[in-house]
Amino acid sequence: MNTMTIRHYRYAGRRITAVGGDIGPEQAPGLRRGLFLALTGVAEDLVIDTRGVTTMTPAGLAVLIGCRGRIQARGKSLVLVDERGPVSASLTRVGLFPAFAVRATVEDAVRLTERPPTAERDRGSSWRASPPRTGSVAR
């Protein structure tokens, strides 16, 4: 397995959290801590760039689902950056892709966070990237 990486940076004035590598049961606690750090003291929508993720197991997916719930409880949105990768494939497999706002680029994700909050934006709707057709997802 590849080592998981988490990096926080700013793009166009927004904080971006980039996640990479394999996200399995062993990495899920580290992912949870990294995303908790991203949420701490931040009063804006959260953009998570998952294009560097090579494997996403149910344990890692559970962390993303929990993070989405926490940020929505604050009245904010979670936007994933993923272009038909393992994260999108996992969300599709469990039927949750429509519940997440997913964009293909960081630029598109940041642009989405600049729009006023709406139910359409929070669940992705027509602005999201297309779900993956097929994909290899670790179980």
Image (cartoon, grey):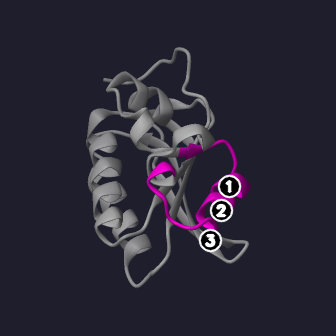
Residue 108: x %, y % from top left: 70, 53
Badge 3 amino acid: Tyr
- Residue 27 visible in the shown view: no
Query: Can you say which quadrant of the picture contains the C terminus?
Result: top left
Distance from disc 2 to disc 1, alpha carbons, whole Å, reads: 6 Å
Distance from disc 1 to disc 3, alpha carbons, whole Å, reads: 11 Å
Does residue 45 lie above or below 31 as drawn? below
Which numbered disc, 1 or 3, marks the residue that appears first in the sequence?
3
What is the quadrant of residue 58 in the picture? top left
The label shown at residue 110 is 2
Magenta-colored span: 102-120
Tell me what residue is drawn at x 40 percent, y 85 percent: 41
- Residue 37 visible in the shown view: yes
Badge 1 amino acid: Val
The label shown at residue 9 is 3
Asked if marks 1 and 3 touch (Cβ < 8 Å), the reply is no
Badge 2 amino acid: Val
Q: Count neighbours of disc 1 (C-alpha within 10 A) and say few if under 14, some if 14 to 19, many if 20 or more.
A: many
